[in-house]
Amino acid sequence: MALTHAILAALQEEPCSGYDLMKRFDGSVGFFWQASHQQIYRELSKLEDLGLLQSEAIRQAHRPDKKIYRVTDKGLNYLRQWILEPGAASPTRDELLVKTFAGHLVDWPAFKALLEQQRGQHLERLAIYRRIEATYFSDPQTLPRPYRFQYATLRKGIRSEESWLAWCEEIMTLLQPD
Amino acid sequence: MALTHAILAALQEEPCSGYDLMKRFDGSVGFFWQASHQQIYRELSKLEDLGLLQSEAIRQAHRPDKKIYRVTDKGLNYLRQWILEPGAASPTRDELLVKTFAGHLVDWPAFKALLEQQRGQHLERLAIYRRIEATYFSDPQTLPRPYRFQYATLRKGIRSEESWLAWCEEIMTLLQPD
DNA sequence: GTATTCATGTAAAAAGTTACATGATTAT
DNA sequence: ATAATCATGTAACTTTTTACATGAATAC
């Protein structure tokens, strides 16, 4: 039970169609909970059946109908209740660390290349986050309260990427053969 | 395809039984790739069928037999090849960030308590990592090469926890109502 | 005597991934 | 003309989680 909550969290911000949601999951929410469009469409139907969402079909000129989903009161309460449940920290599943654990099995230049490649990805990601920060959150003190919570998640993203980059640099030195 | 690799990575370090592996997944490897015992037993059988592992039954006095699994040459090569595949950074899936994203829906003291509770978990985890570091990796320069790679993964664990803690403190201030 | 450790599984449900499918519209 | 965007799905598959199950041995 988790995509459920990510969807409710995204939709409470603003009601939208499955297609829009899918794009939303490619940005903000998707930075800490990614999902494919199939997952999203399936979950939306399920949540509507459960009465946590309700949809309204919008007829469009020269385009297929779209269904705008919004969170019901029942859905909001369900989400609130879930937020307050204590719960354990989400477990990590990180391929690069598995690879690193057994990294001595391959030769150093090859492993180093792998690290450089990952470092590149994290650099890119950090640049994206910083751009969002500069564009939408340049003055956090004046943000309306709901947006401060969103900004908090962005801050975690930034810190995570910075942490990756620092680690990459640290272990390049550590693992460099003498 | 990922638990496969985590198991191969763990077993190449030292062959062991399913039960031992399961405990290993509660420590070192499990810090970045957790798995339940059912997953592990199933995967071990599958990997033996594929010829990536081979097992040897050990008879024990007054105890059920145990099967010691070891990585075959084929398994080692398979693992090596996988390590060198570029691949995208593992996606994050973090409940606390989903909760934070919609955190304005609950009242501040309740949300703050949630943060404190998570902070406690990360503090504990960091203490565990630091203890391992002090016990086994006090002098990284003199470590044999394979252990340096393991130490690298521990360093990531430490950095991640530190990053969480710093974030918790940052957003406590950010989210505190005026 | 009660709980924990050793040792291994089956079964079912939930969640996530990948592939295939359609069809109009708008931008290059 | 070709690619990308809008819009929504079905089907099959893999992976992960949760529950149920057994049985002896040892530690408290």
Image (tube, coloured by chain):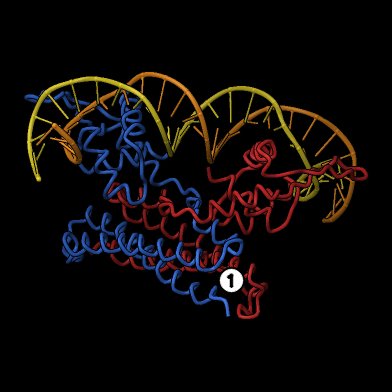
Chain colours: A red, B blue, C orange, D yellow
Q: Between residues B95 and B115, which one lies in front from this camera angle?
A: B115
Mark 1 surroundings: few (<14), some (14-19) or many (≥20) residues within 10 A: some
Q: Identity of the amino acid at label 1?
A: Arg
Q: Nearer the viewer, residue B94 or B99?
A: B99
What is the chain identity of the residue bearing mark 1? A
Query: Quadrant location of residue B67?
Result: top left
| Residue at the spot 48% in from the left edge and 65% down from the top edge | A161
Image quarter of the C terminus of chain B:
bottom right
- Residue at image point 61% right, 61% down: B105
Q: Position of residue A81 (x, y in %)?
A: 55, 52
Can residue A73 be seen here? The reply is yes
Residue B130 figure quarter: bottom left
Q: Which residue is mark 1?
A: A130
Of A116 and B170, the residue lying toward us: B170
| Frontmost residue, B30 versus C18 | B30
Quadrant assignment, res B37? top left
Residue A25 vs B163, above or below: the answer is: above
Counting from the top left corner in percent of width and height, residue B124 is at 30, 61
Q: Is residue B51 visible?
A: no
Q: Is residue A81 above or below residue B10?
A: below
Q: Quadrant of the N terminus of chain B?
A: top left
Residue B82, percent from left and from top: 40, 42
| Horizontal and vertical percent position of residue B62 | 8, 24
Q: On the picture, is B3 further left or further right than B12?
A: right
Identify the residue shown where x is 78% and y is 47%: A68
